[in-house]
Amino acid sequence: MGVLIGVVGSRGDVAETPSTSRTVTAPPQTGGPSETHTASQPATTAPKKDAAAAAEIPGDGVFLVGKDIQPGTYRSDGKDNVLCYWARLSDTTGELGDIVANGNAEGQVIVKINPNDKAFQTSDCKPWQKID
């Protein structure tokens, strides 16, 4: 019980110290580190997304041109014994008329995604690498 009393006594002291520290610590965190931290994060995050989007289309999905991926010429090694499907899309409604061009490939395939394409769809393909 002597230990408990010592712990309770120190908790009372600690409770008073953080409240004082919090008041003193809060203004510097709000003024200095958050401004520096906030400015660093967007600058660091945005280029990583843009660089990754421009260099590769990672796998299956529908990717928006100009947002997820950049226009340009891409190459995929296709798939072995399975057809790799790709489509350039003028819209994302899912209508058959949205397909500008499409194809199936068993081996390597090269596709040019135009700036006016709305999206690019890929299924069962190895990652696409931007080559131009």
Image (spheres, helix red, strand yellow):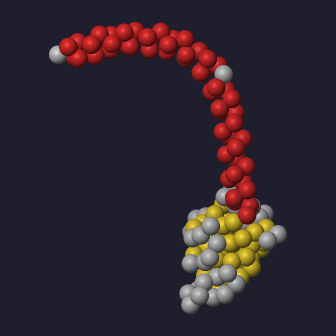
The front one of 19 and 30 is 19
Residue ID at (77%, 64%): 71
Q: Is residue 60 above or below residue 106?
A: above
The front one of 22 and 70 is 22
Residue 91 in view (yes/no)? no
Residue ID at (68%, 53%): 49
Residue furthest to the right: 132
Residue furthest to the left: 1
Quarter of the N terminus within the rendering:
top left
The spot of residue 84 in percent (x, y) is 61, 82
User: Residue 98's quadrant in the figure?
Assistant: bottom right
The front one of 62 and 132 is 132
Image side of residue 56 versus residue 5, left or right: right
User: Residue 94's quadrant in the figure?
Assistant: bottom right
Quarter of the C terminus within the rendering:
bottom right
The spot of residue 39 in percent (x, y) is 70, 33
Residue furthest to the bottom: 81
Residue ID at (23%, 17%): 3
The spot of residue 59 in percent (x, y) is 59, 70
Q: Is residue 88 above or below residue 118?
A: below
Q: Is residue 16 above or below residue 60?
A: above
Residue ID at (63%, 88%): 106
Image side of residue 21 versus residue 107, left or right: left
User: Residue 110's quadrant in the figure?
Assistant: bottom right
The front one of 123 and 37 is 37
Number of dots carrying numbers: 0
Residue 111 in view (yes/no)? yes
Residue furthest to the front: 2
